[in-house]
Amino acid sequence: MRREAKKDPPRAAPSRPTPHASLAGLSKPTLDRLAKLNISSKFDLVLHLPLRYDDETHVYPVKDAPAGRDVLIEATVVETDIKYRPRRQLVCHLEDGSGTNSTITLRFLNFYGSQVKQFAPGVRVRAFGEIRHGFFGAEMVHPRYRIVQPGAPVAEALTPVYPTTAGLGQDTLRKLIARAMASDPLEDTLPEPLIREQRLPKFRDAVFFLHNPLPEVSQQALQDRTHPAWRRMKFDELLAQQLSMRVHHQRRRGMGAPALHVRGTLVSRLLKDLPFELTQAQQRAVAQIRGDLERPHPMQRLLQGDVGSGKTIVAAIAALQCVENDFQVALMAPTEILTEQHYRKFSAWLESLGVGVAWLSGSTNKSVKKQILIDISAGRVAVVVGTHALFEDDVVFNRLGLAIIDEQHRFGVRQRLALRLKGTQASSANAGKPQAQPHQLMMSATPIPRTLAMSYYADLDVSVIDELPPGRTPVTTKLVSDARREEVIVRVHEACAAGGQAYWVCPLIEEIESDGDPEENAPQTIAKAAAKAAPTASPKPAKPRGRGGLEALQLKAAEETHEALTRAFPDLKVGLAHGRLKPAEKSAVMQAFQRNEVQVLVATTVIEVGVDVPNASLMVIENAERMGLSQLHQLRGRVGRGAAQSACILLYHAPLSAMARERLKIIFENSDGFEIARHDLHLRGPGELLGARQSGVPLLRFADLATDTDLLDAARDAATTLLAENPAAARAHLQRWLGGRGEFLKV
């Protein structure tokens, strides 16, 4: 769980926790090392639970000790020597007198001079480690050991092994944790009826057990975290998260926001002018958003839907409801390509209604930007579309009523907050008026699995568009080895020659050398296939790529592929789009592709979102095994937007790793974004799926959303009950788990 320092550094960057008074007396080096483990209080030590356990409760005779796993043996030093072949090492020969095969060698490849004296002949040693049987008999390499007296008692509980950092040994951690537990009563924060209802152990009992489990307990239950003590920790953690989300939701309900009543004039005209009708799912989302906007507290709704489900028109209708009430709308997206796409759509839909739309990005001309800023401040622009540039200091809204954030998971917490705070800015137009926060609508084309939504978005209202507009054709996904590249090139040429268009996606711009045969490199293969693809062509042979690099997989450079395809398809226009192009150049290429002046677009993943070309019915993705499920699904969604049968060809390089094979199997078998997201959660976990490590969302430490859905459901219900019937217990639980150092804030 990420902690914030008192000096309030940027949330997106990791920060060291400030030591709590309960850790007083520890040295600064120790405090610094604890801080690296996000331990800043006595209770943090209590919750620093073991990664695994060693069984030092039973001493095995050397002759009976099982090989292949860590065991505890006790024997007497017979001889100690320093060997120099094959390298300097300390070798200790021990014997425990248990009969035949009762000798064992302890081998230390790194050691101190003092250790040589420790292992004096006749000394009794207790060593813990894995026994290996070699040419010279049984041995342990770098075991954990201690000098003991004959008959010394063994441990009564399993030995915990904790997550640690350099300079902080296990013994030190064990002492600190034991001291913390001894000085804290660890009283329960949950009411007794709730504990009984969930069949959970007492908190104190669970903590003590996890730090010192008895040897007869099931090691599997400890490892899988299914033991009742582990379930208590998971439930408490999930409950704290749910309570925090609910409290935040209640606080938001207490804030002020403009009540944007339904006027209907502009919305009715827009719906009448549209060449299509809204789906039932879109109508349902519109009704939910409409109701939120009419309330005098800030809407915070997540609009999620699969690629191409029609989220943008729903956002445009929400924007018009805001404009009808004389408030402004800000729409922020993470890339210029996506903002330009939104700008063009909003302009086409709204400007005929007399609604001014402006586009603001980091590349906007200074003089143009200056005028746009003046118009925004004066209220002459109703809808502003832009990138991160929208929350710069010089952007001052006159009356911001609604902030729309597309691909919201790509923005950090503070960035989303910065845009919302634009609605509370004082300007010459609203000086002296009571400040109110704007409503906020967040959109995501990355469907969120139910458990993730319940856990990390519990403070949000969620609308789901779960059907595609009529006329959208399903996309056929094909897995093709790059050994069959020639066939793919012929397929691309045939599709474009018949009037269609195609994307060819490369994962990187930079050329990375291959360790494969130059004859298998993409540009050469493209050149070789040109005769089949376009018989009248006379392409120059592609320049072979170097062989010096050792990459497990080839990464085809976009620029090189563009050059080769241009030679292979002399009768077609091949364009190139990547992140290093100047915005004007990138925009020109994309517009040419939309007008069908470019038939084949070679691009990096800058086209992942926001590109809408109905005539493009074929996509080829290089090195698909290197991409994540969400990215592959987003890219695939760029085709199938028209009436023509569409296909996405995933080129992969064999051999495939087990993880890559699993990803490609999932994307091949599933077209439902929610099902793909469920698999993605299982493969990657919530941190990467949410962008949480970048956005500041604290991650769960103990609970696993893939396996603990029953606990999540129970915690959700318990949070509702506690807040309504026992708010004191809810406060005590939040204080224990989150303290005063923050919440699971969602902004």
Image: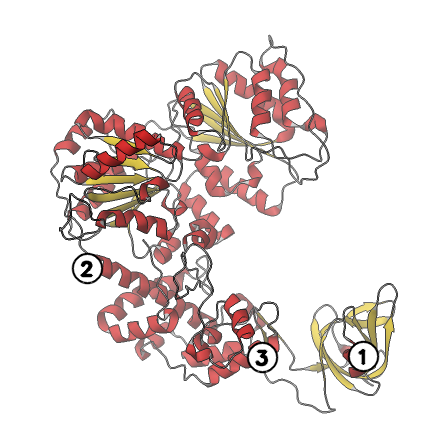
Query: Which mark is first along the chain, 2 or 3?
Result: 3
In the image, residue 63 above or below residue 257: below
In the rendered image, residue 121, in percent from the top left (x then y), is placed at: 84, 85
Amino acid residing under circle 2: Gly
Marks 1 and 3, Cα distance to the nearest angstrom?
37 Å
Q: Nearer the viewer, residue 138 or 710?
A: 138
Residue identified by numbered label 2: 254
In the rendered image, residue 420, in percent from the top left (x then y), is placed at: 27, 49
Crowdedness of circle 2 by 10 Å Cα count: few (<14), some, many (20+)?
few
Residue identified by numbered label 1: 116
Crowdedness of circle 1 by 10 Å Cα count: few (<14), some, many (20+)?
some
Q: Residue at x 81, y 69 (%)?
A: 133
The mark closer to the camera, 3 or 2, is: 2
Q: Residue at x 38, y 45 (%)?
A: 447
Q: Is residue 309 visible in this depiction of the protein?
A: yes
Q: Nearer the viewer, residue 632 or 91?
A: 91
Q: Quadrant of the N terminus?
A: bottom left
